[in-house]
Amino acid sequence: MLLGVDVGGTFTDAVLARDGRLVTAKAPSTPADQSEGVLNAVTAALGRAGGDAREVERFAHGMTVATNALLEGRGARTVLVATEGFTDVVELRRQARAELYRLCAAHPAPLVPPELRLPAPERMGPDGPLRALEAPDAARVCDAVAAAEPEAVAVALLHSYRHPEHERLLAAELARRLPGTHVSLSHEVVGTFREYERAATTEVDAALSPLLAGYLRRLVERAGEAGLPTPAIMQSTGGLAEVPLAAAHAALTVLSGPAGGAAGAAYVAARAGEPDALCFDMGGTSCDVCLIDGGRVRESPGREIGGRPLALPALDIHTVGAGGGSIAWRDAGRALRVGPRSAGADPGPAAYGRGGTEPTVTDANLVLGRLGAGELAGGVALDGAAAAAAVGRLAGELGLETRECAEGIVRVASAEMARALRVVSVERGVDPRDYALVAFGGAGPMHATAVADELGMERILCPPTSGVLAALGLVVSERRRDAQRSVLLSGAALSGEAVERTFAELAERARAALDEPGAALRAVYELRYRGQAFELPVEVAGEEAAEPGALAEAFAAAHRDRYGYVDAEGEVELVTVRVTATAPGPDVELARPPGAGESEPAGSRAAVFGGAEVETAVWRGTPAPGAELTGPAVCELPESTLVVDPGWRGTVDATGAIALRRA
């Protein structure tokens, strides 16, 4: 058996692949200790499969521990050691305003306060030491660190990406002086040249790693007691890593949860004949969107999360606070707003009957008849009266009827998700009308046709396991390691020999870290015209380094696509080389869940579409292959609900995936 478990804000999802079929389960997330919810979901899945934990051969896990801590500004007590005169580099940032037209808006405070930023009496230049760090000085710095009683230490010295000797000297002294204290070194965490982004990423890595290590320690203990293997952890890149690496470098896992969903969406889209897709994962707390081109999720060399830069490769995922549990409210201008605040897993939406009183997107869908007043996956019974009361209170504030308010909540949430999809498509020069919309997450299929209407899209794909697709993505994900280095080569220095030497060194590092001598390789070369401030990536797959001439041509094409022109006289500079080694994940048959499949609707109920209440066909379970759905219809899948608006119709393929098109 192959096992994937994804922790979301509201539910924890588990998928077991066994004997050519998939078995799925959900359990409420347990924010106080997420490992408890993980084991609850695994137990439920094993019970449905009739299996034993000792039969599980591979266990992959995606979680939000590092994400939540970063967004909330939580972290271990961390000391930052930086080059003398540069201890405030993270606070100074790049001196750009947080918001251009809101002068009062502020950036988040650094995770390390001023009193815990300590100088190292050294100065490294790009060509070597300008002021050597002597052993007695390193000892004095470490004494000062020890006096601060830290739980973690971040070391970020100038030009350590090229000359890490001083960072290594401090690391050795810290290991002697503070054994057991977590230490993050910037040349190991990032390895690229921009001092602010490198220091900020190292600070995040140091502050979050003790928290993540504690969680993973509890998870490994619980898994061992249950007879499960040690889990592999999803990284922000969409590849799996072993627990020791994830625990040592939490910054690698900040997008762990969303990355599993992106991997699952790419897998099912490719098998449905849709290699180009926009992915839309709406859970209980947030909505994550990304773009798939040619069967692969787009990546970015770095990104900002919660106002903090992470100079590490990651899937290009954009997140907004619009989920099933997002709370609707009236702003100061009496406008209806939805999110980003969420009811979460506890108490959850009012409809859950656990004491929640504020109206959410889930409550609105229940009031409109798009959700049935039964039981959600995970054993949550829905309370229609509580949902109507919550929406009714907001309706009174807005001067609306309850049903009008519920429709408004759904429209605002759908518009917010469409805006997020525009960020990863229209704002990247991509026409969404050329792509299929892959809708998943517990609430994604409920809003799929409304979002597609907003974007003018013609095709929607709803996988049969849409409610647990992130967990399926963990099951099928590849193992991956990255190695990168800033080289800053131009002119005569940008030679084939220099590129080949760098590629070979990084490929060896990546394969050794993966422990796969024959792992597949691909390289990303970040280039710019000399004098530019930002680079464009050029990807080349294969065992050989790219030729400088071919890189220059590919860069010119990318520059023309992005900026509309090419500088024929400009000198091309190779800034950073990143080599990725991967070992493929298992190939899983997307069989329909056992016992699912009805060739005809199970009945009907009244639901609201376009302001009118209409009789709506209701399907329960996964429709049988070949079945046709015509809107208005509601399909209550095992872990999610698909709403088919009037004007859309769909067919079901052999795996149970529902492909919708405009009628």
Image (cartoon, rainbow, N blue to C red):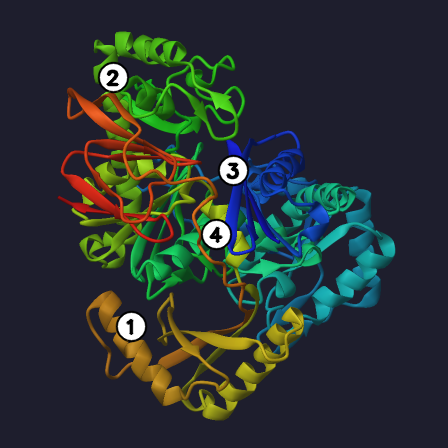
Mark 1 and 4 residues: CB-CB less than 8 Å, in contact?
A: no
Q: In the rendered image, is residue 197 in sight?
A: no
Q: Residues within 10 Å of mark 3 (few under 14, many from 20)?
A: many
Which residue is denoted by mark 3 in the rendering? 8
Q: Cα distance, mark 4 to mark 2?
A: 34 Å
Q: Are marks 2 and 1 in contact (CB under 8 Å)?
A: no
Q: Which residue is mark 2?
A: 405
Marks 2/3 in contact by CB < 8 Å: the verdict is no
Res 292 → quadrant: bottom left
Query: Residue 260, how many percent across, how many down?
Result: 49, 51
Q: From this view, report whether residue 109 is shown above or below residue 186.
A: above
First reached walking from the N terminus: tag 3 or tag 1: 3
Viewer-nearest residue: 577 or 193: 577
Q: Position of residue 491 (x, y in %)?
A: 40, 87
Q: Going from the N terminus, do you reach mark 1 or mark 4 first?
A: 4
Q: Quadrant of the C terminus?
A: top left
Q: Position of residue 522 (x, y in %)?
A: 48, 75
Q: Nearer the viewer, mark 2 or mark 1?
A: 2
Amino acid type of the residue tagged 2 in the rendering? Cys
Q: Label 3 to label 1, Cα distance in Å?
A: 36 Å
Q: Residues within 10 Å of mark 1 (few under 14, many from 20)?
A: some
Whether residue 279 is visible: yes
SS label for mark 3: loop
Reading the image, the residue beneath label 1 is 558
The residue wearing badge 4 is 259
User: Which one is in front in this view, the residue at disc 1 or the one at disc 4?
Assistant: 4
